[in-house]
């Protein structure tokens, strides 16, 4: 196993043992988001050099939800609940080598285009085999990539 795969395996086992795992599926009407993307598509591409994806909207929605429900962004340390007052959001990205979850640091401070750029940067690092352990650690919440849906 490569060092990064070994570390990922260790973290998955630790996460399974140390966290309350929760998966939820909800439907959302994204017609306004789709409309917004269409309406500003050309201007956005001219300004930032790429098309706006859906993940930045998912990230921003999750950050707002975590602010409203801070217990979801907390962790347990022994008998203590540690409330995190930062939003380091893991983004699940599939690659040829398997699923990895790099972390967007301080996602609450990122603009939509910065979220997209960071995710693209992680994808490039994954393809070049340059993702570091620090890219994968410290997330407080994880989002699966819903862009294909």
Image (tube, rainbow, N blue to C red):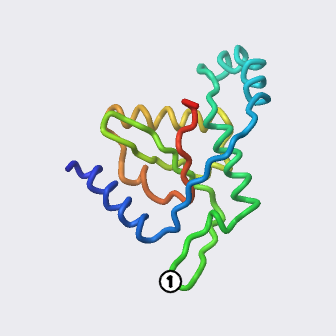
| Local SS, label 1 | loop
- Numbered circles on residues, count: 1
* Residue 113 vertical placement versus 87 (above, below): above
Q: Position of residue 147 (x, y in %)?
A: 57, 32
Q: Position of residue 2 (x, y in %)?
A: 22, 48
Image quarter of residue 134: bottom left
Query: Between 137 and 48, which is closer to the camera in this rendering?
Result: 137
Query: Quadrant location of the C terminus?
Result: top right
Image quarter of residue 36: top right
Query: Between 149 and 41, which is closer to the camera in this rendering?
Result: 149
Q: Residue furthest left?
A: 1
Return the residue at label 1.
78
Q: Residue at x 69, y 41 (%)?
A: 27
Q: Position of residue 73 (x, y in %)?
A: 62, 63
Q: Position of residue 18 (x, y in %)?
A: 45, 71
In the image, 52: left or right of 144? Answer: right
* Residue 80 vertical placement versus 145 (above, below): below
In the image, 35: left or right of 115? Answer: right
In the image, 30: left or right of 125? Answer: right
* Residue 20 vertical placement versus 144 (above, below): below
* Residue 8 vertical placement versus 131 (above, below): below
Pointer 1: residues within 10 angstroms few (<14), some, or many (20+)? few
Q: Residue at x 64, y 44 (%)?
A: 59
């Amino acid at each position: 196993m490569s060092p990064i795969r070994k570390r990922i395996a260790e973290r998955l086992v630790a996460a399974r043992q140390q966290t309350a795992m929760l998966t939820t599926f909800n439907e959302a009407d994204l017609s306004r988001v789709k409309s917004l993307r269409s309406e500003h598509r050309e201007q956005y591409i001219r300004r930032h050099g790429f098309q706006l994806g859906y993940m930045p909207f998912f990230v921003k929605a999750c950050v707002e939800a975590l602010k409203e429900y801070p217990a979801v962004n907390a962790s347990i340390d022994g008998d203590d609940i540690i409330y995190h007052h930062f939003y380091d959001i893991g983004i699940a990205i599939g690659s040829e080598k398997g699923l990895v979850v790099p972390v967007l640091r301080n996602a609450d401070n990122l603009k939509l285009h910065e979220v997209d750029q960071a995710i693209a940067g992680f994808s490039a690092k994954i393809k070049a085999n340059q993702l570091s352990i620090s890219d994968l650690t410290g997330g407080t919440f994880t989002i699966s990539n819903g862009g294909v849906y």
